[in-house]
Amino acid sequence: MNRPNRSVWMALAVICLVGALVAAWLLARGPMPSEGRTSHVDPASAEAPPFLGQALAGEPAGARPEDPKFARMRARMVEEDLRGPGRAIRSAKVLEVMAHVPRHEFVPESLRYRAYADHPLPIGHDQTISQPYIVALMTELVEPTAKGRALDVGTGSGYQAAVLAEICKEVYSIEIVKPLAEEARERLGSLGYKNVTVRHGDGYRGWPEKAPFDVIIVAAAPDHVPQPLVDQLAPGGKLVIPVGRSYQQLLVIERDQQGKVHRRPNIAVMFVPMTGEAQQLRQ
Ligand SMILES: C[S@@+](CC[C@H](N)C(=O)[O-])C[C@H]1O[C@@H](n2cnc3c(N)ncnc32)[C@H](O)[C@@H]1O
């Protein structure tokens, strides 16, 4: 048998060496992008979870950049002052919204660092923005829905209107102090709330042109329940209102599907008095 000559052995060795080098290069390189053998998602371009405000009815108010410390303060407020012991706001929807609406945007600049403490704060013109717990409680009591139309009497800073706007389809808000109404309208607009209409006027007679309402929240105390507000409740609608003078009680008034009106008392509260017609009718 003929033995292969030396040059054949050399050629075979070169072919093996080149093959080994090509194989090593292919292994080291990994798959080409077009090969698509691995599914790679760039974390920066991965789909982000929907921002809360977009998931709800209102505009993404919090979407404008904010100092992260406000988000931390808001989270503490929700955990301790709203959900915490002795408070127990139960509605997940209300808690979500309270965790989202930037309350610090609704108070004077110099008071922003106190915006998430659980008490009312002055907003000028002898008026206040209500305590967060009371805003959450009143919102929970009226059980707003995404299809609902809301009336907010006593716009003040516009914070309660913003909370309602995150849940309801339409919000109508009335404020008797003209500069407050104008400031709130501008603030709500700049925060992106397109489903809130603010009007300067006396809320005692409600907003008959926009009635009936599924929810009505009143943030100033008359000494009796204004009948026009009860009349503007839709079947199944709920009105929450502080009533009284030195002693005030939060009342929940509901019109059932048959049109019958029921009222039940809730906690004792302390609101600014309702002015305008309510004041003239005080006995
Ligand atoms: C406790 S503050 C409201 C807080 C407000 N909801 C907020 O989120 O800032 C009560 C507001 O009711 C307003 N008010 C009082 N009587 C009113 C009336 N008859 N009609 C409309 N607003 C009234 C006051 O001027 C005041 O701004």
Image (cartoon, rainbow, N blue to C red):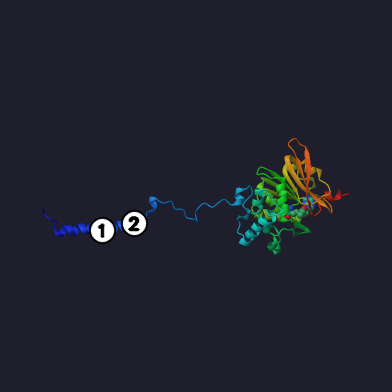
Query: Is residue 81 visible from the viewing direction of this image?
Result: yes
Residue that lies at the very extreme toward the left in this rendered image: 1
Q: Write the residue at 37% across / 56% down.
A: 30
Residue position for label 2: 27
Along the polypeptide, which appears first: circle 1 or circle 2? 1
Residue position for label 1: 18
Assign a secondary structure to mark 1: helix
Assign a secondary structure to mark 2: helix
Q: Write the residue at 16% across / 57% down.
A: 8
Amino acid at dot 1: Val
The CA distance from mark 1 to mark 2 is 14 Å
User: Is residue 14 found left or right of 275 in the rendered image?
Assistant: left
Where in the figure is residue 117, as x and y percent of width and height?
70, 60
Residue that lies at the very extreme toward the right in this rendered image: 283
User: Is residue 148 found left or right of 39 in the rendered image?
Assistant: right
User: Is residue 72 found left or right of 23 in the rendered image?
Assistant: right
- Ligand 1 contact, mark 2 (Cβ < 8 Å): no
Where in the figure is residue 221, as x and y percent of width and height?
80, 51
How dense is the environment of label 2, judged by Cα within 10 Å: few (below 14), some, or many (20 and up)?
few
How dense is the environment of label 1, judged by Cα within 10 Å: few (below 14), some, or many (20 and up)?
few
Question: As rendered, which of 78 and 113 lies closer to the eye?
Answer: 78
Amino acid at dot 2: Leu
Where in the figure is residue 55, as x and y percent of width and height?
60, 48
